């Protein structure tokens, strides 16, 4: 089963810097990245820059249409108004199967703001203790915004990063 996680950084450049770490972990076969994308929202900008990470995506990559729809719902639909928002309601229904629902959209929208960045990862096969150790060693301070992991797995991740 693939896991979708969203990591927020208080620095607009941290998500991009984390990409190298994820690449290294994938080369060491400590995680399998099916797809990934970054959101960088520089201070003073009206909206964020988004980028699908083709260099990390595996054969099962979701593709640009998925990321475009997701980021559109999170960052751009609120700017377009209720008429367009209502039309996208049917599209979001199909995303709930992978843990993307209104709560997901609302929480990411509230957390990823000007001056921050985020890394969206669709992964499987993570050797969690080794991945978490590598993140700690790199000194990355990330906040887990969302995951479709079980409550126990999510609590363990949050506890590790709170230390």
Image (cartoon, rainbow, N blue to C red):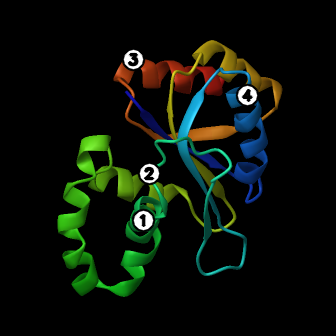
The answer to whether mark 2 and mark 4 are in CB contact below 8 A is no
User: Which corner quadrant holds the C terminus?
Assistant: top right
The location of residue 143, given as percent across then percent down, is: 59, 40
Neighbourhood count class around disc 3 (C-alpha, 10 Å): few under 14, some 14–19, many 20 upward = few
The residue sitting at 63% across, 13% down in the picture is: 129
Q: Earlier in the sequence, mark 3 or mark 2?
A: 2
Residue, disc 2: 62
Q: CA distance from mark 3 to mark 4?
A: 28 Å
Q: CA distance from mark 1 to mark 4?
A: 27 Å
Neighbourhood count class around disc 2 (C-alpha, 10 Å): few under 14, some 14–19, many 20 upward = some
The answer to whether mark 1 and mark 4 are in CB contact below 8 A is no
Q: Residue furthest right?
A: 138
Residue, disc 3: 152
User: Which corner quadrant holds the N terminus?
Assistant: top left
Q: Of helix, strand and loop, which one carries label 2?
A: loop
The answer to whether mark 3 and mark 4 are in CB contact below 8 A is no
The residue sitting at 64% across, 44% down in the picture is: 56
Q: Nearer the viewer, residue 56 or 134?
A: 56
The residue sitting at 44% across, 19% down in the picture is: 153
Which label number is shown at residue 27? 4
């Amino acid at each position: 089963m693939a896991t979708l996680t969203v990591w927020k950084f208080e620095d607009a450049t941290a998500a991009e810097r984390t990409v190298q770490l994820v690449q290294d972990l994938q080369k060491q076969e400590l995680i399998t990245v099916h797809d990934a994308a970054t959101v960088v929202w520089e201070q003073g900008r009206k909206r964020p820059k988004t980028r699908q990470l083709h260099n990390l995506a595996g054969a099962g990559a979701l593709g640009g249409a998925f990321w475009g729809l997701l980021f559109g719902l999170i960052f751009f639909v609120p700017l377009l108004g209720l008429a367009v928002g209502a039309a996208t309601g049917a599209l979001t229904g199909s995303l709930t199967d992978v843990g993307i629902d209104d709560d997901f959209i609302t929480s990411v929208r509230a957390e990823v703001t000007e001056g921050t960045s985020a890394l969206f990862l669709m992964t499987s096969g993570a050797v969690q203790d080794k991945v978490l150790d590598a993140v700690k060693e790199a000194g990355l301070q990330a906040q887990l915004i969302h995951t479709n992991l079980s409550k126990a797995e999510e609590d363990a991740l949050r506890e590790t990063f709170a230390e």
